[in-house]
Amino acid sequence: MQEISYENSSNDTKAGVLENESLIEQFVQELCQNGAVVLDDRSGFFSDEEWAALETFGLLSGLPYETVDVGDAGEPNKVEVGRLMTDVEQPLVVNESISKKMLKIICAPSRLKFMENLLGISPLSVRRAQINKMHAGSFIGRHVDQDSNPDYEVSIVLQFGRAFDGGEFIIQLPDGSQNVIVPTFRSITITRCDFAHEVRPVLAGTRTSLVYFVSRHAGLNRRYLSEAAVGSSASTMA
């Protein structure tokens, strides 16, 4: 994977990705070829204060977690999930006393505008958001995010884990090869939702991340509509 430079070519000073439009073409190429763009903590996508706030709200403010053994797409999992925004029939903010504070940060207009420039799609909105907490033995099975919602464009994964082994993020590329991503503290992984991917078992430590999904479609989940139509047809035929 090509190393990303955050230097602003116009004045040779460091610029965050949100203000550096010259990086978009490089990111588009990365996303097309490798299925993902990885930013480190120098990117300026979030400030130090915003990172700290997201971590505090998500991990230290009493957000309830549930153990998930089977994912939305039917894949085997072993992960603890804290819900901020669900997307079953339609987007729904849950655990509002915590989630609204976090969504205000991740849904800032400058960040959505960056994603719109990256994807060439406008407008975009966040449909789903959650925190995944993975201990030793935890994993996420291979799946395609668009099986949960066909309108998901990309997921954005913010890494809170400071010290863990294993837990590599594996993307299956169309040519049969794999893009193996080793997330680091405060890294950001932007991933295509039409590529199969998985998280290998965590071997030691705790791997905690915030993941959210963006879409051009803000209405009812078309997967739900399709399943409802099939159910209605079956009832009519019975």
Image (cartoon, grey):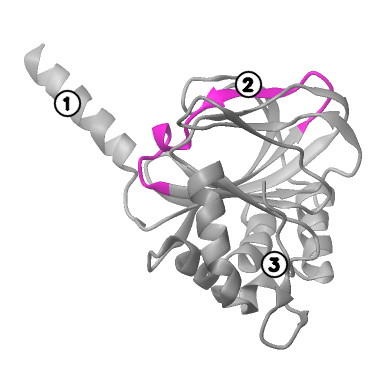
In the image, residue 200 above or below residue 154: above
Disc nearer the start of the sequence (3/1): 3
For the residue labelled by badge 2, is the local secondary structure a helix, a strand or a loop?
A: strand
Q: Quadrant of residue 134?
A: top right
Residue at the disc numbered 3: 45
In the image, residue 236 above or below residue 211: above
Is 172 on the left-hand or right-hand side of 136?
left
Amino acid type indicated by mark 2:
Asn
Q: Which residues are magenta?
A: 134-152
Q: In the rendered view of the protein, which quadrant contains the C terminus?
A: top left
What numbered label is drawn on residue 232? Answer: 1
For the residue labelled by badge 3, is the local secondary structure a helix, a strand or a loop?
A: loop
How far apart marks 2 and 1 lie (CA) works out to 30 Å
Residue at the disc numbered 2: 77
Is 162 on the left-hand or right-hand side of 216?
right
For the residue labelled by badge 1, is the local secondary structure a helix, a strand or a loop?
A: helix
Is 90 on the left-hand or right-hand side of 164?
left
Residue 157 x %, y %: 65, 48
Residue 111 x %, y %: 58, 69
